[in-house]
Image: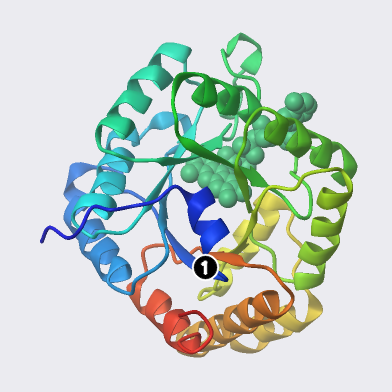
Amino acid sequence: MVKGCITVKLTELFASKKSTLSFEVFPPKNTDGYESVSEAVEKIAALGPDYMSITYGAGGSNSAFSAAVASDVKKRCGVTPLAHLSCVTATRQSITEYVRILTGDGIENVLALRGDIPDGVDPSGFEFEHASDLVAMLKEISGLCVGGACYPEGHPESASLAQDIEAVRIKVAAGCDFLTTQMFFDNNVLYNYMFKLRDKGVNVPVVAGIMPITNAKSIKRICKLSGIVLPQRFRMIVDRYGDDPDAMKQAGIAYATEQIIDLYANGIKAVHVYVMNKPDVAAKIKENLSSIVK
Ligand code: FAD
């Protein structure tokens, strides 16, 4: 199926639409997984999100698949792709080559990330220290629309939220056009964070990242790794329904839907949902918002 290939720079999208809803997918680890990922991606794309982001394996492990899925999103599905790209173990040369592949496929949007430093590796010899270094390089060598990550509860490596916000300010000063947040489960955390960002002069669009939790085990792991705090209200849901997969899924989607509606109602214009290649979850969220995001 070849659909229309007209896609947009996300800065133009954010400027032109009252509210946007986008979905995130991840590429397969190997060729064997490509078909099932493609199927999921097509179904998610058929729901008509404003754009879809495609994650990039730590250290570039699945970079070819990431670029291929981003290209499929654009060419086969007719949806604007946002290709993630991490630089932690990359070189200027490898980034230049990868950007050539992306732009050759007509991809216009990249989420520039540092990526996690591999365990036990000394990063002092790496060519890129921070995501802001990648942002600056992408702006220097391409006309890409470049986004970056931000963390409403602070990045786990940061000594304080204030220090982390200063790093975001530097990233934006390096040319970052928009930010996408780490997931959060208490909207007040985001509202406080937005106030602090704007106070420090960070005025680019901020896309709120929402994760519908459909599995109790995964949330415990995610919180442990990222330092995200689960509000009491959500912990009660996990405690009550965590052992019943269908109930947990229904409750997780309902909680995410409520978060999203509250975000739009409070002036957040762009919401990105981490649907993790699950078309049924994406479809339910979309259905729940059918009269809210048109
Ligand atoms: P940075 O912005 O470099 O920040 C990392 C740490 O360094 C922070 O503590 C920050 O405060 C500090 N810092 C940054 N700049 C400076 C500076 N100039 N001076 C001093 N300190 C500084 N990972 C993947 O591997 N693939 C993905 O596809 C992916 N997608 C993601 C999407 C989103 C929306 C988010 C929020 C994260 C994603 N990640 C992904 C995870 C991300 O790579 C990790 O969180 C990583 O540890 C940090 O990446 P970053 O781009 O935020 O790094």
Task: Tell me where residue 164 appears, x and y as whole percent.
Answer: 80, 39
Q: Residue at x 28, y 61 (%)?
A: 41
Residue 182 showing in the rendered view: no
Q: Residue at x 52, y 61 (%)?
A: 16
Where is residue 184, by image quadrant?
A: bottom right
Residue 7 showing in the rendered view: yes
Tell me: residue 150, above or below residue 106. Answer: below
Residue corresponding to mark 1: 20
Task: Tell me where residue 55 appears, x and y as whole percent.
Answer: 43, 47
Tell me: residue 235, above or below residue 58. Answer: below
Say left or right for 4 vs 239.
Answer: left
Ligand 1, by image quadrant, is: top right
Numbered disc 1: secondary structure = strand
Kind of residue indicated by mark 1: Thr
Where is residue 77, by image quadrant?
A: bottom left
Q: Residue at x 41, y 12 (%)?
A: 93
Task: Tell me where residue 188 appears, x and y as whole percent.
Answer: 82, 70
**Farthest left residue?**
1
Task: Tell me where residue 49 appears, x and y as whole percent.
Answer: 40, 68
**Farthest front residue?**
16
